Amino acid sequence: MRQESGRSMIEMVGVLAIMGMLTATAFALISLGINRQKQARVMDDVVTIVSGVRGLLGDYDDFSNIDNSTIFAAMSVSNKNPYGGTYELAVNPYNQRQFIVRINGLNKSDCEALITKAWTDSVGYNTSNHKESGATGNCVDAGNNVVSITYGE
């Protein structure tokens, strides 16, 4: 009797199932890494924008002179964020010694993640004794959510 060598169909299906699980895990980890990188980039961009606004308008008593196109051009920073939306600057209508950085075009999960980050040096973060993140937003829409962070006095 001759002995056959090779793999059975069950062994091949088992190997393919293991490879599929490893591939799915790799995709999940890559996606998580990309999201964390985007969040880090947004935080860095916001720090750059806040520093730029304070540097450009720090000599004034208030931030009522904020003009998005002029500010972004003067700082040589793009107003595009990594999520496909934009950054926007506005004066706080209730206190002209404060300005608001808005991050537009976020999906629900990215909006929720950015709201929970600690935005150090923001008004909300400082006035809550570092207990709140300092960001606000309503994260309900599929891709048009906005996170707002207020800076100033």
Image (cartoon, rainbow, N blue to C red):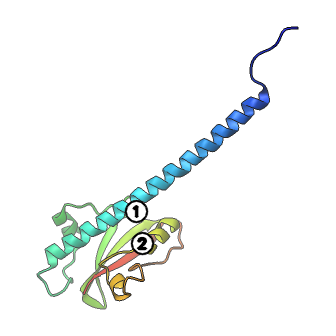
**Residue displayed at 47% across by 65% down:** 110
Q: Tell me the quarter of the picture where residue 119 sits.
A: bottom left
Per the rendering, the mark at residue 111 is: none
Q: Label 2 near label 1: C-beta < 8 Å?
A: yes
Q: Amino acid at mark 2?
A: Lys
Q: Residue furthest bottom?
A: 94
Locate residue 21 relative to residue 134 in the image: left or right: right
* Residue situated in front as seen by the camera: 87 or 122: 122
Q: Is residue 81 visible?
A: no
- Compared to residue 152, the image places residue 41 above or below, namely above
Whole-percent x and y of residue 90?
A: 29, 78
Q: Residue furthest top?
A: 1
Within-10-Å neighbours for mark 1: few <14, some 14–19, many 20+: some
- Residue at which label 2 appears: 117
Whole-percent x and y of residue 4?
A: 80, 14
Within-10-Å neighbours for mark 2: few <14, some 14–19, many 20+: some
Locate residue 74 relative to residue 148 in the image: left or right: left
Per the rendering, the mark at residue 39 is: 1
